[in-house]
């Protein structure tokens, strides 16, 4: 077992570089299954979720070579082997092999996926979309069995703009006969990145970034070289880390438009921000003020930044509210923030936060990826020492979190116990 130990109170200062986007690289790795040749992916972060996806591709027969932040993926010998729960339940994004395997091979058997326990994330939208393309799907005993003699384009409307369902439908439809029109599609930047990768492989997709995506099916896809976009959630997390410690930090390798919802709330709270190309500088000389936050699908405030902004608001002047509109079980970090002295009350899907002048170090436990990041941020600002247990959750989405914080002057270490 490991734990992260933080001696809080240091003002973060300096420059940090953001890694490639976790939520972009995972569907891109899945999409590599659609061709039977070698692709090269650049700017691949070293994350636990990426390693699980690489292991999954290797299990299916892909030959993978990693060189620093580059992956060479040869899918020539991939076969649609049955994927059991030992692989599928290790992360939610394992379901992103559904569309590619069905599109390339016409059949698959996979266990239901796992992932962070932050609320209901059913597969019904994924499966409904794939069925609309002509697949026969059976769900039984925790497994999904799908078969299709050939996929055919369709007009599909998603009940909610699910990111994963949008990605799976895009990948399957890219090699279906005819044209697919996907309505009420997710608009996240990671969807645009997947479109760009698929088009680099020879797909004909347009509209990603809007709520209507058109996919004109092609007979086959080929390999390509592609660089993944920067991680907007990692960028937002380091911006909040600077704000919560009243620091002065420049975050590089950022697409500012992708983090605008976070920047808007930081400005509203009183942080000073400067944007220059692909860098954002944030500096805070005093205590920030309370703001109200509501999570929404992109381009609204991201649910993946909700725990981090709540940690910041625990120290803001006045009373804030944070309303979670995406996942019904994403307040597990609240009792842990309370252990650090935060004054937070939950009413339904809204957290009411009365800002305190200070937090005090304590032993806390990370229940999931973003909750763990929030506890690290709170520990950076808290008095005395904070111990974060179960840091393996953080490793799913942050590359070298402690090292990057150390570069900025934080007193943070990871120890094995």
Image: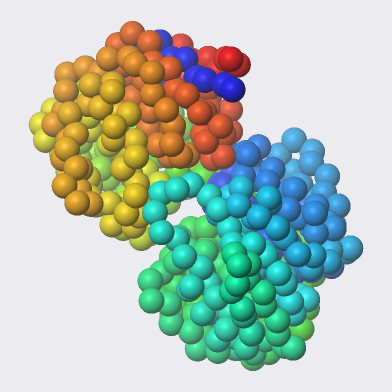
Q: In percent of the image, x 55 and y 53: which residue is there?
A: 114
Q: Is residue 85 left or right of residue 229?
A: right
Query: Which quadrant, please, contains the C terminus?
Result: top right
Q: In percent of the image, x 31 and y 43: which residue is there?
A: 331
Query: Which quadrant, please, contains the N terminus?
Result: top right
Q: In this view, does 14 lie to the left or right of 146?
A: left
* Quarter assignment of residue 169: bottom right
Instruction: From the top left corner, tell me how far across and down residue 361 is, in percent.
Output: 33, 14
* Quarter assignment of residue 151: bottom right
- For residue 229, say whether it is visible: no
Q: In percent of the image, x 38 and y 32: which residue is there?
A: 374
Q: Residue furthest front?
A: 141
Q: Which residue lies furthest to the right in this view?
A: 77
Above or below, 270 against 70 in this view is above
- For residue 45, say whether it is visible: yes
Instruction: From the top left corner, tell me how far across and down residue 181 is, in percent.
Output: 51, 84
Instruction: From the top left corner, tell me how far across and down residue 64 is, in percent.
Output: 82, 49
Please name the colour scheme applied to the rendered image. rainbow
Instruction: From the top left corner, tell me how far across and down residue 2 is, in percent.
Output: 57, 21
Q: Is residue 306 left or right of residue 148?
A: left
Above or below, 107 against 64 in this view is below
* Quarter assignment of residue 333: top left
Q: Between 300 and 277, which is closer to the camera in this rendering?
A: 300
Above or below, 218 against 77 in this view is below
Q: In percent of the image, x 70 and y 81: which residue is there?
A: 147
């Amino acid at each position: 077992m490991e734990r992260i130990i933080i001696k809080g109170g240091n003002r973060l200062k300096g420059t940090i570089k953001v890694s490639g986007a976790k939520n972009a690289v995972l569907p891109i790795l899945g999409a590599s299954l659609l061709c039977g040749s070698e692709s090269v992916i650049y700017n691949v972060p070293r994350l636990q979720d990426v390693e699980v996806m690489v292991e999954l591709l290797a299990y299916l027969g892909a030959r993978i070579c990693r060189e620093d932040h580059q992956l060479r993926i040869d899918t020539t010998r991939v076969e649609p082997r049955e994927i059991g729960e030992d692989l599928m339940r290790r992360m939610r994004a394992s379901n992103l092999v559904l569309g590619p395997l069905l599109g390339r091979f016409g059949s698959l058997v996979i266990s239901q996926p796992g992932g962070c326990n932050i609320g209901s994330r059913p597969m019904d939208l994924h499966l409904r979309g794939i069925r609309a393309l002509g697949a026969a799907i059976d769900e039984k005993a925790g497994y999904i069995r799908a078969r299709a003699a050939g996929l055919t384009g369709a007009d599909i409307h998603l009940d909610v703009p699910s990111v994963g369902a949008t990605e799976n439908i895009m990948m399957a439809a890219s090699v279906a006969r005819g044209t697919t029109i996907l309505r009420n599609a997710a608009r996240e930047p990671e969807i645009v990145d997947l479109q760009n990768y698929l088009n680099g492989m020879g797909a004909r997709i347009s509209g990603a970034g809007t709520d209507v995506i058109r996919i004109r099916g092609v007979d086959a896809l080929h390999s390509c070289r592609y660089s993944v976009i920067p991680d907007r959630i990692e960028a937002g997390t380091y911006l909040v880390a600077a704000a919560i410690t009243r620091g002065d930090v420049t975050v590089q390798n950022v697409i500012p438009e992708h983090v605008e919802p976070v920047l808007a709330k930081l400005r509203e709270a009183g942080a000073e921000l400067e944007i220059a190309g692909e860098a954002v500088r944030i500096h805070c000389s005093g205590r920030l003020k309370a703001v109200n936050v509501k999570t929404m699908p992109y381009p609204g405030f991201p649910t993946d930044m909700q725990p981090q902004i709540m940690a910041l608001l625990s120290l803001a002047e006045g009373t804030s509210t944070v309303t979670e509109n995406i996942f019904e079980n994403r307040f597990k970090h609240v009792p842990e923030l309370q252990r650090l002295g935060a004054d937070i009350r939950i009413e339904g899907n809204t957290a009411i936060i009365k800002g305190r002048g200070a937090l005090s170090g304590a032993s806390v436990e990370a229940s999931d990826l973003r909750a763990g990041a929030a506890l690290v941020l709170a520990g950076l600002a808290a008095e005395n020492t904070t111990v974060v247990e179960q840091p393996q959750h953080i490793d799913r989405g942050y590359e070298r979190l402690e090292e990057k914080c150390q570069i900025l002057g934080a007193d943070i270490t990871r120890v094995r116990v």
